[in-house]
Structures are given as C-alpha cells and as structure tokens.
Image (cartoon, helix red, strand yellow):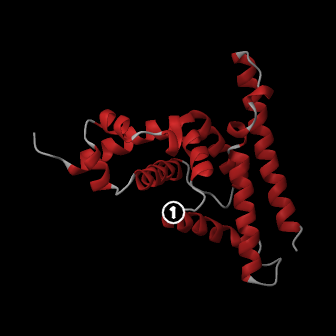
Amino acid sequence: MPYDPAATRANLLDAAFAEFAERGLAGARVDRITQAAGTNKQAIYFHFGSKERLFDAVVEARCGALITDVPFSADDLPGYVGEVFDYLLDHPPLMRMILWQQLERQSPTEHEAESYGALAEKLTGLFTAAVDSPDDALLLARTLLMLIIALATAWATSTPALRPGDEAQVRRHVAIHRRAVVAAATATITALTTETT
C-alpha cells in the first residue's frame, strides 16, 4: 500500500488529540501517539516539526471544528454562549484540550491570535458609539470576548465538589447552569455596553 501523507497527518492529529486531551502536552508521549496512529516518530517530525507544534495543530484543528459547528454570532451573543456551552458539554475531550492548552501554552499561536482578534473586531460595533477611540472599543470588545469564553466554559472549570452525584440531578443542574450562563452573558453585555470607562 503506498504511503499517503494526508492520511498519516490526519491519523496523527486524531491520535494526538486523544493523547493530549487525556494527558496534556507534558504528559503525552510521542510513542503512544505514533502507536495509535499506526506510524513512527519520524512522521510527527516530518509533518509537524515537534511535539509542541503537533499540540498546537491539534488545538487549531479541534477549535476550528468548534468554530465551524457553532458559528460566532455577534447579533445573539447570549445564544452563542449557550450553544458553545452545549457543544463543550457534548465534547468533553475538547474541553479538556482547551484547559490543557491554557495551562501549558501561555502564548497563543499566530492562527489563534488572528482568530480571536477577528472575533473581537466583530464586537467593536457594540462599543464604537459609546467610546471616544477605536482602541477603547477594541479593548471593550476583547474584554467581552474573554468573559463570554469564561462563561461558556464555566461548567467544566467549576469544582466537581459542587456538582450533585445523582445523574438526574446532574442533568437538572446542567440545565440550571446553562440558563445562568446565558443570563450572565446578557448581563455582561448590558454592563459593558452601558458602562464605559
């Protein structure tokens, strides 16, 4: 069977996602990734250059899937927050990957910085009439985006000690939590668009 570089790359990304989501960047082992992908270590270095760049490629690919599956809506931010909350709840390995990224990769990739910058730009219109400068509008837009992301990931980052143990209670608690997240997003947007500095 001839070597298929695209298939090898895709297999590496899938295997690496499972490994990184479970163990993080520091705990992940290249040999486990290559074994699961059915290839060798040289394939990682050929396609990605290093384990760190493989990690970044996995984050980019999986977060890209989130962006595709839950399109950003500046017109309905509370609804968007609720949809991202639901998506992350349905995709726990992605949420773990995001948490590992925040812990282990303090600097964003170029693609990540551009993506978040573009989202913040879409929000500046909420603030341009209320502030004196475009820089202030962008600062408020970035603040709002940070808070929206924090709200959407709130369930995953909350302490398990506060979650009920019974499955039926967990479902009820998640529904209450989701309503609170959407309400908090609404309140945050109102606070930032009416109270400017």
The quadrant in which residue 115 appears is: bottom right
- Looking at the picture, tell me which residue is in the foreground, 189 or 151: 151
Give the residue drawn at x 87%, y 72%: 196
Place of residue 109 in the rendered image (x, y in percent of width and height, measured from the top left): 51, 63
Q: Nearer the viewer, residue 17 or 151?
A: 17
* Left or right: residue 134 compared with residue 91: right
Q: Which residue is mark 1?
A: 109
For the N terminus, give its image quadrant: top left
Residue at left offset 57%, top offset 55%: 105
x, y percent for residue 3: 15, 46
Image coordinates for residue 157, horizontal then vertical, percent: 71, 40
Q: Secondary structure at mark 1?
A: loop
Left or right: residue 67 compared with residue 177: left
Q: Residues within 10 Å of mark 1 (few under 14, many from 20)?
A: some
Three-letter code for the amino acid on which mark 1 is drawn: Thr
Nearer-the-camera pick, 173 or 158: 158
Quadrant containing the C terminus is bottom right
Q: Where residue 102 appears, x then y in whole percent? A: 62, 51
Asked if residue 177 lies left or right of residue 88, the reply is right
Q: Residue at x 81, y 46 (%)?
A: 183
Give the quadrant of residue 144: bottom right
Taking the view exactly as shown, the residue that stands out farthest to the bottom is 132
Residue 84 vs residue 33: left or right?
Answer: right
Residue name at image x 34 percent, y 37 percent = 31
Q: How many marks?
A: 1
